[in-house]
C-alpha cells in the first residue's frame, strides 16, 4: 500500500492516491492543482522513507475540488 504523511494547516494527515480529503483552506482556486512539499513520511510498497523533519525533494500533488464552509459557531 502506498501512502504519505504530510503537514498542512499545522496538522499531520495520512494521504493515499485516489482518495478525497477535507483539509485547511489553501490559497488555490477550486479545480486547480497544487503541490505539497511538507512530506514527513512515504511508504511505497513497504519501502519507508522518513524525513527529519521533511523529506527533501519529495512532493505530494492534488487537486482542489471545491472550497467548503462549515456552520457558523
Image: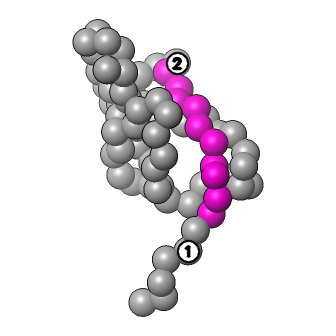
Q: Is residue 49 visible?
A: no
Q: Is residue 70 visible?
A: yes
How far apart are the alpha carbons under marks 2 and 1? Answer: 33 Å
Residue 26 locus on image (x, y percent):
60, 55
Residue 40 locus on image (x, y percent):
35, 30
Residue found at x 31% / y 20% = 1
Horizontally, residue 10 falls left or right of residue 32, namely left
**In the image, is residue 44 above or below residue 62?**
above
Q: Nearer the viewer, residue 10 or 14?
A: 14
Residue found at x 48% / y 46% = 20
Q: Specify start and end residues of the magenta stretch as a single range.
A: 58-67
Secondary structure under tag 2 reads loop
**In the image, is residue 20 above or below residue 5?**
below
Residue found at x 46% / y 50% = 21
Tell me the tag on residue 69.
Answer: 1
**In the image, is residue 47 above or below residue 67?**
above
Hey, which residue is sitting farthest front in the picture?
A: 18
Query: Which quadrant of the figure has residue 63?
Result: top right
**In the image, is residue 16 above or below residue 67?**
above
Tell me the tag on residue 27.
Answer: none
Residue found at x 71% / y 55% = 30
Residue at mark 2 = 57
Horizontally, residue 36 falls left or right of residue 21, namely right
Evaluate if marks 2 and 1 touch, with contact meaning CB atoms under 8 Å apart.
no
Query: Which quadrant of the figure has residue 15?
Result: top left
Residue 54 locus on image (x, y percent):
39, 28
Amino acid at each position: 500500500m502506498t501512502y504519505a504523511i504530510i503537514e498542512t494547516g499545522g496538522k499531520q494527515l495520512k494521504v493515499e492516491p485516489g482518495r478525497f480529503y477535507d483539509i485547511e483552506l489553501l490559497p488555490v482556486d477550486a479545480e486547480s492543482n497544487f503541490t505539497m512539499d511538507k512530506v514527513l513520511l512515504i511508504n511505497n510498497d513497504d519501502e519507508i522513507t522518513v524525513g527529519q523533519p521533511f523529506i527533501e525533494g519529495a512532493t505530494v500533488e492534488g487537486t482542489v475540488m471545491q472550497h467548503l464552509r462549515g456552520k457558523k459557531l
